């Protein structure tokens, strides 16, 4: 497979059309066509060894896949023991998922941080406006402790684009964080406090910060091994009370993905247009269910050109007719990772 140099990266000529199309999608903030997705599928089915082997195990001929709904998604668990790549490249970063001492973390081999930051910033600014309107205060102790985090890389990029001297990370020094927030309130910018669930709860319980109406608290999940698990609604109730704010926002991402989704309130997540959410039957992983029905979440992330764009998660949820979606938990047999919260049915 011939390769073409683009700056420091080498992109195979077979992938160039898909990469150029992705650049257009990012610039115009638009969705790929079904033809675009099918072309990407056939490229990855041919050149991604892990995905190709998975399709072969299913007895599937990629040339017989004629619609997007027929595309099988790669189980996210395969990222633990395999290098999921669609061509050979030197990784600019290797992100690792959270895991206990008995678990093997998933790994995502990222060829270009420049493109990742471009994707992340484009998505964020669509929802929240220019990064230069914000001061970012990040409370991400577990992510900072283990390093190699896609979430920290994303926040790094947002802080860099913001360029404000009060941007910064905190771990367990909540009093200093509250003082930083107070100082940021004296600037001409809004403040975004982005944090992992358990750390935000600890801070909220101190009742030392009352947010201004224009400021945002954004949780990224993360309650594993940190006391009693909470459903997202209960978590948000406590955070709203502790921070004296009307609404808690959510960022939904995964180590294995290149794009994030945001909920600007009440758990309704909006993916970027180049990401498609599909819901699969709980008992038949290859059968899609109707809008509004609960099932396992499959994700098509066009920005995952270098890896695999077709990911079968262990998360449960449902979609709305406009493509927005809700995450309500994980399948019972799935191992917990830091990005999700438990679901307790009524």
Image (cartoon, helix red, strand yellow):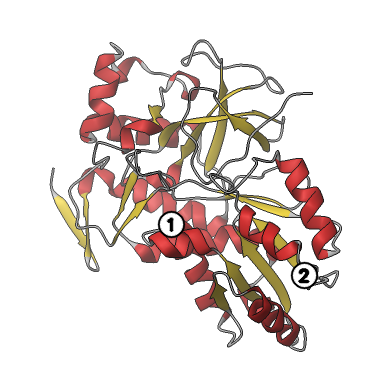
* Mark 1 neighbour class, 10 Å CA radius: few under 14, some 14 to 19, many 20 or more: many
Q: Are marks 2 and 1 in contact (CB under 8 Å)?
A: no
Quadrant location of the C terminus in the rendered image: top right
Q: Nearer the viewer, residue 68 or 267?
A: 267
Residue 230 x/y as whole percent: 69, 41
Q: Give the residue at mark 2.
A: 215
Where's residue 300, x and y in %?
48, 36
Determine whether the residue tagged by mark 1 lies in a helix, strand or loop.
helix
Residue labelled with disc 1: 150
Say whether residue 303 is left or right of residue 78: right
- Determine which quarter of the picture holds residue 206: bottom right
Q: Residue furthest left?
A: 2
Q: Is residue 215 left or right of residue 253?
A: right
Q: Nearer the viewer, residue 231 or 7?
A: 231
Could you tell me which residue is drawn at 40 percent across and 33 percent down? 76
**Residue 267 appearing in the image:** no
> With respect to residue 295, does 59 lie above or below?
above
Residue 309 in view: yes
Tag 1 or tag 2, which sits nearer the N-term?
1
Q: Position of residue 93 (x, y in %)?
A: 30, 60
- Whole-percent x, y for residue 11 in the image: 23, 53
Q: Nearer the viewer, residue 137 or 197?
A: 197
């Amino acid at each position: 497979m011939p390769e073409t140099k683009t700056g420091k990266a080498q992109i195979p000529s077979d992938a160039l059309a898909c990469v150029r199309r992705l650049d257009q999608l990012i610039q115009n903030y638009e969705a790929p066509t079904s033809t675009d997705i099918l072309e990407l599928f056939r490229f990855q089915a041919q050149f991604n060894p892990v995905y190709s082997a998975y399709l072969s195990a299913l007895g599937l001929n990629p040339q017989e896949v004629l619609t997007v709904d027929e595309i099988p998604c790669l189980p996210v668990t395969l990222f633990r023991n395999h290098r999921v790549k669609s061509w050979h490249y030197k990784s600019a970063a290797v992100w690792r998922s959270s895991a206990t001492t008995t678990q093997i973390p998933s790994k995502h081999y990222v060829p270009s941080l420049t493109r990742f930051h471009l994707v992340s910033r484009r998505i964020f600014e669509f929802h929240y406006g220019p990064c230069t309107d914000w001061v970012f205060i990040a409370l991400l102790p577990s992510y900072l402790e283990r390093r190699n985090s896609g979430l920290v890389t994303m926040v790094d990029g947002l802080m860099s684009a913001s360029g404000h001297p009060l941007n910064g990370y905190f771990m367990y020094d909540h009093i200093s964080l509250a003082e930083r927030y107070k100082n940021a309130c004296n600037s001409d910018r809004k403040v975004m406090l982005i944090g992992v669930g358990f750390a935000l709860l600890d801070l909220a319980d101190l009742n030392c910060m009352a947010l201004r109406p224009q400021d945002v608290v954004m949780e990224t999940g993360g309650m594993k091994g940190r006391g009693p698990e909470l459903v997202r609604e209960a978590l948000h109730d406590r955070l709203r009370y502790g921070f004296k704010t009307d609404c808690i926002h959510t960022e939904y991402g995964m180590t294995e993905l290149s794009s994030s989704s945001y909920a600007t309130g009440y758990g309704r997540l909006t993916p970027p247009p180049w990401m498609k959410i599909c819901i699969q039957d709980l008992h038949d992983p290859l059968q899609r269910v109707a809008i509004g029905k609960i099932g396992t979440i499959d994700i098509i992330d066009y920005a995952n050109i270098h890896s695999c764009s077709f990911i079968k998660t262990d998360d449960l949820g449902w979609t709305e007719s406009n493509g927005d979606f809700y995450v309500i938990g994980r399948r019972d047999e799935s191992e917990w990772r830091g990005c999700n919260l438990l679901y307790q049915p009524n």
